[in-house]
Image: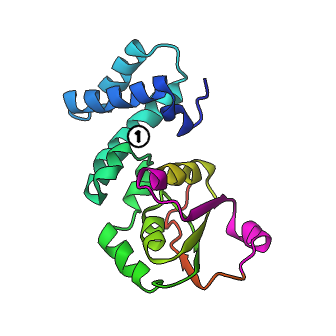
């Protein structure tokens, strides 16, 4: 069993843990200490970070609810939801890319802007440096039935020279505004 995220949540044990976490958060009024204590009893033997990441994703799903019904099946980090562009703003930004053959996006995040760009352009290539966020974004786009996006994991300055950008006629970048550490 893999414990890498978000792949872990796609496995039966991980999916069950995620559902149970959401139920317990509601039952215990988002008291994360009580929830994690209960999860450790009900799902023994998992590495400690599994419980914390699952609680984080469940709480992030709650925060993401205003962004659409698909979010109840999406994967997020707290930061990716806090920094997400609202759907109305993302759609507004994306209007300037209407009719583009291919938009290059730098900084995918959880894929909120990416989804809006995909609705306007024929194709989107999106670059995300964080492997976990890149995987989450792929999942989030699939949940929304969006299939005209290619997410490339890596630093933009390393990835762009390897791409055939001859068809790119639009560029969008919305980098994180937080510095970790």
Residue tagged 1? 56
Q: Residue at x 57, y 81 (%)?
A: 101
The magenta segment is: 140-165
Q: Residue at x 61, y 62 (%)?
A: 150
Does 2 sit above or below residue 154?
Answer: above
User: Which of the 4 image quarters holds residue 80?
Assistant: bottom left
Q: Residue at x 41, y 41 (%)?
A: 57
| Lateral position of residue 11 relative to residue 35, left or right | right
**Looking at this view, is 99 or 56 the one in front?**
99
Does 49 sit above or below residue 152?
Answer: above
Specify whether residue 160 is painted magenta.
Answer: yes
Specify whether residue 163 is painted magenta.
Answer: yes
User: Which of the 4 image quarters holds residue 156?
Assistant: bottom right
Does 8 sit above or below residue 149?
Answer: above
| Lateral position of residue 31 relative to residue 149, left or right | left
**Looking at this view, is 5 or 16 the one in front?**
16
Residue 181 in view, yes or no: no
Q: Secondary structure at mark 1?
A: helix
Q: How is the image coloured?
A: rainbow
Q: Position of residue 68 (x, y in %)?
A: 29, 56
Q: Residue at x 69, y 64 (%)?
A: 155
Q: Position of residue 179 (x, y in %)?
A: 55, 61
Alpha-carbon neighbours of circle 1 within 10 Å: few (<14), some, or many (≥20)?
A: some
Q: Position of residue 58 (x, y in %)?
A: 36, 39
**Looking at this view, is 12 or 48 the one in front?**
12
In the orientation shown, which residue stands out farthest toward the right? 162
| Lateral position of residue 89 relative to residue 96, left or right | left
Residue 38 in view, yes or no: yes
């Amino acid at each position: 069993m893999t414990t890498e995220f978000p792949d872990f949540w796609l496995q039966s044990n991980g999916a069950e843990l995620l559902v149970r976490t959401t139920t317990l958060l509601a039952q215990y009024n988002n008291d994360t200490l009580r929830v994690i204590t209960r999860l450790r009893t009900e799902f023994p033997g998992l590495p400690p970070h599994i419980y914390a990441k699952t609680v984080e994703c469940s709480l992030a799903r709650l925060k993401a609810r205003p962004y659409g019904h698909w979010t109840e099946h999406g994967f997020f980090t707290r930061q990716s939801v806090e920094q997400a562009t609202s759907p109305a703003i993302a759609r507004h930004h994306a209007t300037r890319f209407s009719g583009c053959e291919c938009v290059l996006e730098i900084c995918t995040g959880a894929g909120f802007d990416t989804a809006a760009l995909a609705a306007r352009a024929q194709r989107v290539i999106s670059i995300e440096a964080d492997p976990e966020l890149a995987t989450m974004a792929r999942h989030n786009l699939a949940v929304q039935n969006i299939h005209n996006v290619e997410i490339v994991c890596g630093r933009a300055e390393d990835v762009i020279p390897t791409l055939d950008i001859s068809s790119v006629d639009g560029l969008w970048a919305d980098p994180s505004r937080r510095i970790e550490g």
